[in-house]
Image (cartoon, rainbow, N blue to C red):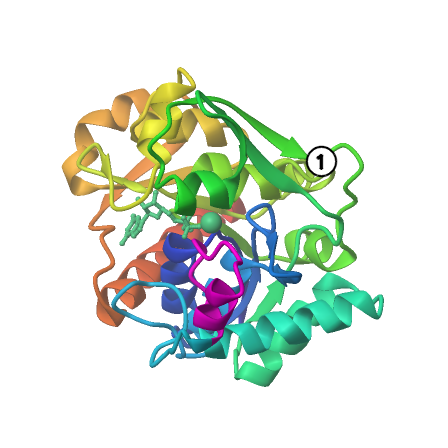
Amino acid sequence: MTRVTLLAGGVGGAKMAEGLAALPGVDLTVIGNVADDDEFHGLWVSPDIDTLSYSLAGLIDRRQGWGVADEGHRALEVLARLGQDCWMSLGDRDFGLHIWRTMRRMRGDRPSVIAADAARALGVGPRIVLPTDDRVQTRVRTDAGWLSFQEYFVREKCAPEIRELRLDGIEAARPTPEALAAIAEAEAIVIAPSNPLVSIAPILAVPGIAEGLRQARVPRIAVSPFIAGKVVKGPADRMMAALGLRADAVGVAERYAGLADVLVIDDLDSAHSAAIAARGLHPECRPILMRDQGDKQRLAAEVLEIARMLAAREEVA
Ligand code: GDP
Ligand code: CA
């Protein structure tokens, strides 16, 4: 068995997780993102962790990539009728998980334990680990003022121009022992093709996590969320450009310098290879679009193969 630790956000992260989880011989631990968490109708909602859990449990709505399949919205209809603001789409089955999570948090249970118990109960094979049990939230300063990430992403549909990103609570955040162990004990570390700024950065920013990656003496492989110079989905490109960063695979390499050995980019981005190498990451070109389970598994197998190649090179050196 190869112990693989994956850093992952929501939809892009879950795709990579599903690919790795399906490979024989992989013992997978996923460190997820909690900085998109927010409270709705008195309930604690953890969108990225739930996307991971629903995907790995086979419950996900494949068409949209998030939420539970075969979902209803009757609870939300009642909340709207009662005058609640209902821009955040939360399904009836989904509500069940949020009710249970909130109940356990109010009892004082650790968020990590709650996430692990939820994953187990839903039938998830891999371990899902939180980077911190403390409250860390992405805030976005736009021309419309400071917004929570969900307000920016879901309510405003990423329309306002971004001026600044902030991670509320990060100074006081402590890493979970599970996340530190997942990094220290990994035989390969993979950074999913997730949004580098709002999915991966909040994991890395928890004190001890980036240091763990920097010190790791095992293959560290990142996969680019850019294909042919564009993101597959979501605001990563616009966010990076708005903050003065390069919005392409080279910009991703700049973010992960010192934290990853290899950046897997798409064959269509091979022109960036030299620029990526100049940032200290070795570029590997592969098809990295994951349309279906076959694509996910194929890419996961390629990533693992690259890890084996790196490990073998280390042994020789
Ligand atoms: P979110 O939390 O739901 O926004 O999801 P993530 O942060 O985990 O992933 C978002 C990123 O995934 C986007 O920047 C997409 O470009 C990337 N992405 C989505 N699907 C694919 C894919 O099939 N291949 C690659 N390489 N990236 C993808
Ligand atoms: Ca997210």
Q: Which one is in front, 182 or 38?
A: 38
Give me the residue at 69% from left, 55% from top. 179
Residue 157 percent location from the top left of the image:
35, 41
Residue farthest toward the top in the current orientation of the protein: 244
Q: Is residue 258 above or below residue 96?
A: above
Residue farthest toward the front in the current orientation of the protein: 82
Residue 165 percent location from the top left of the image:
54, 27
Q: Is residue 133 above or below residue 148?
A: below
Residue for badge 1: 170
Residue 248 placement: quadrant: top left
Q: Is residue 146 left or right of residue 23?
A: right
- Is residue 317 shown to the viewer in this render? no
Q: Is residue 82 left or right of residue 117?
A: left
Residue 261 percent location from the top left of the image:
46, 37
Q: Is residue 251 above or below residue 224?
A: above
- What is the magenta range? 75-90
Give me the residue at 50% from left, 47% from top. 219
Residue farthest toward the left in the current orientation of the protein: 268
Label 1: how many Cα within 10 Å (few below 14, some 14–19, many 20+): many
* Residue type at numbered disc 1: Ile
Residue 214 placement: quadrant: top right
Q: Which one is in front, 214 or 61?
A: 61
